[in-house]
């Protein structure tokens, strides 16, 4: 091994390209992180909101499918919201065969603002989720609906207040945030799932923050019934099983009529018995429905930056391979890697903290490297399972 600065110009060029690409990546990655921080810490505090006495009445629609266990755990928190205006909770039961109906019936004795709607079991040719939401909306009494799912945990008794305070004049849609409950995720790939969830959330959140909303999450999504009916419900995507919270939002949301709510009191957490399986299933669905949203710049940008990340690594590996006996080259390569990795790890740590996800640090560089490969695998899989995303009325 030697240490010499007398290096061939090709090696210098490779290291120079790697350095430039690293700086571009760091600036892009950290600017996104700072935009999220700025929105949560500053814009959330400076916007105008409704006063408590002006909060609108709301109907909370809870989708349930054999979710007796989750309803028993999480429904009381919704029923006991501290909300100054009238609200009702409608559990839409998707033909459950467990004790869902009995449980809700027992709770209705204690909560007079709780009711249940049942989705007919015969309607198997339609999107069950879209039909359930539609039936819940038709059964609702109030002008604003807030959708969630039986397996979603609401952590604050001011959740309704946090979401509904945004419905001032001109606001028709409020996008809330929800994340997986990773506490019991002990499977292989947990860090990847966390990073992927954070990256996906950053995409739609930052797009909405800059006035280009294209999706929300059905775990935590509110809109006016008038907008729903003016859009003829889900009629434009009725041949698809999914899309009630991204294709639909992409159809009706604009920069003027949509708000993003990101204070912790408004967050929800979705629970699954088998999180790795649920993650894979939901990711496949999102990969399909994302093709039909109106704003795709964020996907293209992420793809290009992932390519840049790989090119930077390729330049470093090539330089070291061509001159592996020179400590100067190895040291320069290590410095370039650190220039990328350290800011990226710190930014990811901050993003996870803001989004209430498990904190990631040292695994970030590797997970960032393999994410495009895994995403490509999902896309290839989607080519063979495309028909599964459509209803039988197609």
Image (cartoon, grey):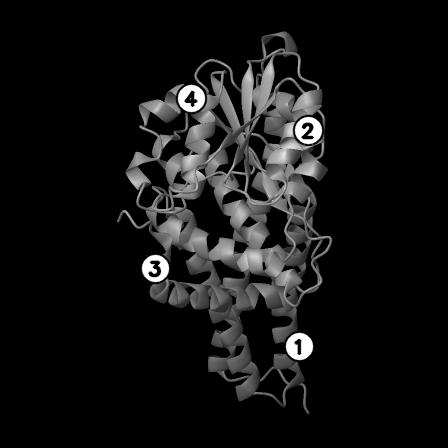
Which residue is disc 4 drawn over?
A: 225
**Dividing the image into 4 quarters, which one contains the N terminus?**
bottom right
Q: Are marks 1 and 3 in contact (CB under 8 Å)?
A: no
Label located before the other in sequence (1 or 2): 2
Q: Secondary structure at mark 3?
A: helix
Near-viewer residue (42 or 106): 106
Which residue is disc 2 drawn over?
A: 106
- Residue visible at 55% across and 67% down? 369
Is disc 1 surrounded by few (<14), some (14 to 19) or many (20+) residues within 10 Å? few
CA–CA distance in space, label 3 to label 4: 31 Å
In the image: residue 180, left or right of residue 215: right
| Residue 386: numbered disc | 3
Near-viewer residue (112 or 86): 112
Residue 58 percent across, percent down from the top left? 55, 19
Q: Are marks 4 and 1 in contact (CB under 8 Å)?
A: no
Label located before the other in sequence (2 or 3): 2
Q: Residue furthest left?
A: 394
Q: Secondary structure at mark 4?
A: helix
Residue 234 percent across, percent down from the top left? 35, 35
> Would you place residue 305 above or below residue 92 in this image?
below
Is disc 4 surrounded by few (<14), some (14 to 19) or many (20+) residues within 10 Å? many
Q: Nearer the viewer, mark 4 or mark 1?
A: 4
Q: Nearer the viewer, mark 1 or mark 3?
A: 3
Question: Is residue 272 visible to us here?
Answer: yes
Question: Is residue 81 visible to us here?
Answer: no
| Residue 331: numbered disc | 1
Near-viewer residue (289 or 143): 143
CA–CA distance in space, label 1 to label 3: 48 Å
CA–CA distance in space, label 1 to label 2: 68 Å
């Amino acid at each position: 091994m030697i240490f010499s600065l007398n290096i061939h110009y090709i090696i210098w060029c490779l290291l120079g390209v790697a350095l430039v690409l690293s700086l571009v990546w760091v600036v892009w990655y950290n600017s996104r992180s700072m935009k999220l921080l700025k929105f949560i810490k500053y814009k959330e505090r400076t916007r105008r909101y409704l006063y408590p006495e002006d909060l609108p009445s709301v109907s909370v629609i809870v989708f349930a499918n054999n979710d007796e266990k989750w309803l028993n755990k999480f429904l009381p928190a919704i029923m006991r919201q501290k909300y100054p205006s009238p609200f009702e909770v409608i559990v839409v039961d998707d033909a459950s065969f467990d004790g869902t109906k009995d449980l809700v019936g027992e709770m209705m004795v204690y909560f007079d603002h709780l009711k249940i709607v049942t989705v007919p079991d015969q309607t198997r040719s339609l999107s069950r989720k879209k039909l359930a939401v539609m039936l819940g909306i038709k059964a609702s009494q109030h002008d604003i609906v807030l959708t969630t799912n039986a397996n979603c945990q609401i952590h604050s008794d001011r959740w309704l207040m946090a979401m509904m305070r945004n419905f001032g004049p001109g606001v028709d849609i409020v996008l809330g945030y929800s994340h997986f409950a990773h506490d019991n995720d002990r499977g292989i790939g947990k860090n990847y799932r966390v990073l992927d969830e954070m990256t996906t959330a950053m995409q739609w959140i930052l797009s909405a923050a800059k006035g280009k909303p294209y999706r929300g999450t059905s775990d935590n999504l509110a809109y006016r019934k008038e907008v729903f009916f003016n859009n003829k419900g889900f009629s434009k995507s009725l041949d698809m099983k999914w899309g009630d919270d991204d294709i639909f939002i992409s159809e009706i949301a604009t920069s003027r009529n949509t708000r993003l709510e990101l204070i912790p009191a408004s967050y929800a957490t979705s629970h699954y018995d088998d999180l790795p399986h649920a993650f894979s299933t939901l990711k496949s669905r999102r990969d399909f429905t994302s093709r039909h949203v109106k704003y795709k710049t964020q996907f293209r940008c992420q793809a290009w930056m992932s390519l840049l990340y790989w090119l930077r690594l390729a330049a470093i590996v090539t330089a070291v391979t061509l001159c592996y006996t020179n400590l100067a080259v190895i040291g320069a390569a290590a410095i370039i890697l650190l220039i990328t990795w350290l800011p990226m790890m710190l930014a990811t740590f901050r993003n996870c903290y803001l989004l209430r996800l498990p904190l990631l640090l040292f695994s970030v560089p590797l997970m960032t490297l393999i994410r495009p490969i895994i995403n490509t695998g999902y896309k290839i899989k989607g080519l063979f399972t495309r028909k599964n995303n459509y209803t039988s009325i197609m």
